[in-house]
């Protein structure tokens, strides 16, 4: 199997190439690393047929959330939001004024340059970003994510505790750490909530934990 960087290097997108080249290497310590924490809202849960309609992201630098370094996007979509509007509250009318997906991807990768990507249940973000890159930039990629859901499972196991599946949802995790509540299924708020959770988890792991270890725990 080829290394994940090879997928980035195949693409004709300058932004993706620059993003891959600037991504922190595995030997970085968390305390020395920038993270970009993101969340996407979609028309459904199947990346083969559904589409991203909103992306929220915020940068964490020196173990500090940087609210002034944040991004909120609404993407145009070839599909109606349908019943998913009941979850995220985004309407077809709002999407008409959204960004073209290819342009939104370019903006996101420029924004995230030099950072490790983080999400809660990161499989969703990774699969939908992969599909979007294939569709709008012509090449797939497989970026290493840090997954706060997987990190939470590792911490729970280390505490010799047991939790139900729904207790790993983002809202439940925030409540357990006594962190600020958020409005769920809003990309911007979910990104900030995940950033709060990441910092709480890093405090428990130790800020000198390596990116390599965080990525391993996230698999």
Image (spheres, rainbow, N blue to C red):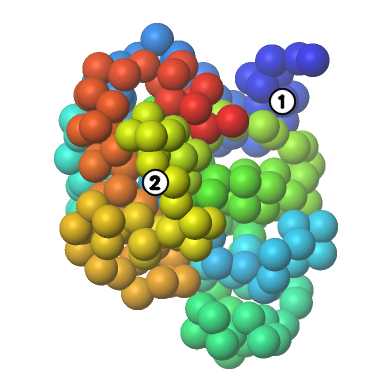
The mark that comes first in sequence, 1 or 2, is 1
On screen, residue 113 versus residue 101, left or right, reads left
Q: Please name whichever residue, 197 or 64, is drawn nearer the observer in this view of the structure.
A: 197
Query: Residue sitting at 76 percent across and 37 percent down?
Result: 139
Q: In which quarter of the image is residue 138?
A: top right
Query: Residue sitting at 74 percent across and 50 percent down?
Result: 131
Q: Name the residue under label 1.
A: 7
Q: Is residue 128 above or below residue 88?
A: above
Measured from the top left, where is residue 148 in percent x and y? 43, 43
Q: Quadrant of residue 205?
A: top left
Dot 2: few (<14), some (14–19), or many (≥20) neighbours within 10 Å? many
Query: Residue sitting at 72 percent across and 25 percent down?
Result: 7
Q: In this view, does 39 lie above or below 119?
A: below
Question: Which of the two discs, 1 and 2, sits closer to the camera?
Answer: 2
- Tell me whether the residue at label 1 lies in contact with that at label 2, contact meaning CB atoms closer than 8 angstroms: no
Q: Mark 2 points at which residue?
A: 37
Measured from the top left, where is residue 164 in percent x and y? 49, 56
* Quadrant showing the N terminus: top right
Measured from the top left, where is residue 201 in percent x and y? 29, 38
Residue 117 in sight from this viewpoint:
no
**How far apart, in angstroms, are the residues tagged by discs 1 and 2?**
22 Å
* Quadrant showing the C terminus: top right
On screen, residue 201 versus residue 104, left or right, reads left
On screen, residue 105 versus residue 35, left or right, reads right
Residue 140 in sight from this viewpoint:
yes
Dot 1: few (<14), some (14–19), or many (≥20) neighbours within 10 Å? some
Measured from the top left, where is residue 198 in percent x and y? 32, 42
Query: What is the secondary structure assignment of the residue under circle 1?
Result: helix
Query: Residue sitting at 20 percent across and 58 percent down?
Result: 179
Query: What is the secondary structure assignment of the residue under circle 2?
Result: strand
């Amino acid at each position: 199997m080829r290394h994940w960087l090879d997928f980035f290097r195949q693409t004709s997108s300058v932004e993706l190439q620059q993003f891959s080249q600037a991504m922190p290497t595995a030997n970085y310590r968390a305390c020395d690393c920038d993270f970009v924490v993101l969340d996407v809202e979609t028309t459904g849960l199947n990346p083969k047929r559904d589409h991203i309609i909103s992306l929220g992201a915020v940068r964490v630098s020196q173990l500090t959330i940087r609210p002034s370094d944040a991004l909120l996007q609404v993407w145009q979509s070839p599909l109606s939001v349908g019943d998913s509007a009941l979850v995220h509250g985004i309407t077809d009318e709002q999407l008409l004024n959204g960004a073209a997906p290819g342009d939104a991807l370019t903006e996101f990768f420029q924004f995230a340059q030099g950072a490790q990507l983080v999400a809660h249940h990161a499989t969703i973000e990774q699969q939908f970003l992969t599909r979007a890159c294939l569709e709008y930039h012509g090449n797939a990629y497989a970026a290493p994510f840090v997954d706060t859901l997987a990190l939470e499972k590792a911490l729970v196991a280390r505490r010799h505790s047991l939790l139900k599946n729904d207790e790993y949802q983002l809202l439940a995790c925030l409540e357990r750490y006594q962190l600020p509540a958020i409005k769920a299924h809003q990309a911007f708020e979910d990104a900030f909530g995940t950033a709060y959770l990441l910092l709480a988890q890093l405090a428990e792991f130790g800020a000198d934990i390596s990116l390599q270890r965080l990525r391993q725990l996230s698999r």
